[in-house]
Amino acid sequence: MPIKLLALDIDGTLLTPNGEITARNSAAISRARQFGVQIVLVTGRRFNSARELAQRLDMGAPLISHNGALTKNVETLETLDYHPLDIGIARAIIGIGRECDADMICCDDPHGLGKMVIEGVSDENKSLHRYLDKYRDSVSVVSDLLEYVDHPPIQIMFSGRCDPMDDFALRLKAAMGEQIQLFKTRYRSADLTILDALSVTASKGASLATIAKKHGVAREEVMAVGDNHNDLTMLRYAGLGVVMANAEDELKRMGFELTSSNEEDGVAEAIERHILTPIEPLKGI
């Protein structure tokens, strides 16, 4: 079946390591749109940090953010699909984070542009300091996160070095069990892992399925492209899942289609091979 909906992860997939969209990727996306393929960005990023990119691409589609916890209209900010954390569960997660001295962010404000609420960040977590400095307008500092969380937040996010975060993820999952979902984005080259604790109903795959159903697109007509562990639910949902060459070997051994890296126009290569090639020979018929 021809592809009618293309789901693209952002970091490590659509963007180069320098955070740019290459001319070839941009051209391939535009060409696919000309043939009626709907393009949806599906990201672990917060809504507001992904919104500018979505606006620049002018895709006219919803933006799936926070690993599927929040889907919004990019222009009107209308909330289309939302899977918040239960208050009690969020507070329990914060308590475990404190016990482990983990750096954590409470992501909130689902009906606006979003904000990050923190108590503080350890001095050695340079990556998180740089991130918070970049989005300083979205940061709120409180004296007590437990006291702040008197309503369901979007998610609780943790970040740190890869091995300690792997250990923390095991401890958090052991404590919370099936009450939460944990999505891990790991960048070994930078020794950085981002760990997102979300509602059990939230995932990239589930939110992508919701959009596909709304637009009458069958699962077999969906193609998803990603590079990290938090992409697995959408890669498995899609009729065609494509993994970037820069993904960890573990993902590349799972049987998905492979494309080039994000430094080598891997998104464009996948679009040209699986979407444009079956269509363009028919132009003159």
Image (cartoon, grey):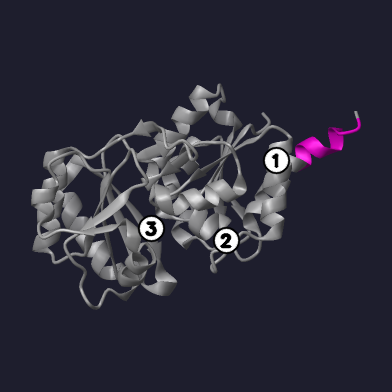
> Which of the labelled discs sits on residue 185, or is there none?
3
Q: Position of residue 11 (x, y in %)?
A: 49, 58
Question: Which residue shows up at 59% across the image and 50% down it?
Answer: 56
In the displayed structure image, the side of residue 26 where residue 282 appears, left or right:
right
Separation of residues labelled 3 and 1 (CA atoms): 28 Å
For label 3, the crowd category at 10 Å Cα-Cα, with few meaning under 14, some 14 to 19 and many 20 or more, is: some
Q: Which residues are magenta?
A: 277-284
Separation of residues labelled 3 and 2 (CA atoms): 16 Å
Question: Which residue shows up at 13% across the image and 64% down it?
Answer: 100
Is label 2 in a helix, a strand or a loop?
loop
Q: Position of residue 71 (x, y in %)?
A: 41, 37
Q: Magenta includes 282?
A: yes
Separation of residues labelled 1 and 2 (CA atoms): 22 Å
Look at mark 2 in the image and give the residue it sits on: 245
Q: Nearer the viewer, mark 1 or mark 2?
A: 1
Q: Earlier in the sequence, mark 3 or mark 2?
A: 3
> Which of the labelled discs sits on residue 32, or is there none?
1
Is label 1 in a helix, a strand or a loop?
helix
For label 2, the crowd category at 10 Å Cα-Cα, with few meaning under 14, some 14 to 19 and many 20 or more, is: many
Farthest residue toward the bottom? Answer: 124
Q: Earlier in the sequence, mark 3 or mark 1?
A: 1
Query: Eyeballing the image, is 238 above or below 144?
Result: above
Q: How many marks?
A: 3
Q: Could you tell me which quadrant the C terminus lies in?
A: top right
Q: Amino acid at mark 1?
A: Ala
Q: Earlier in the sequence, mark 1 or mark 2?
A: 1
In the displayed structure image, the side of residue 186 where residue 105 appears, left or right:
left
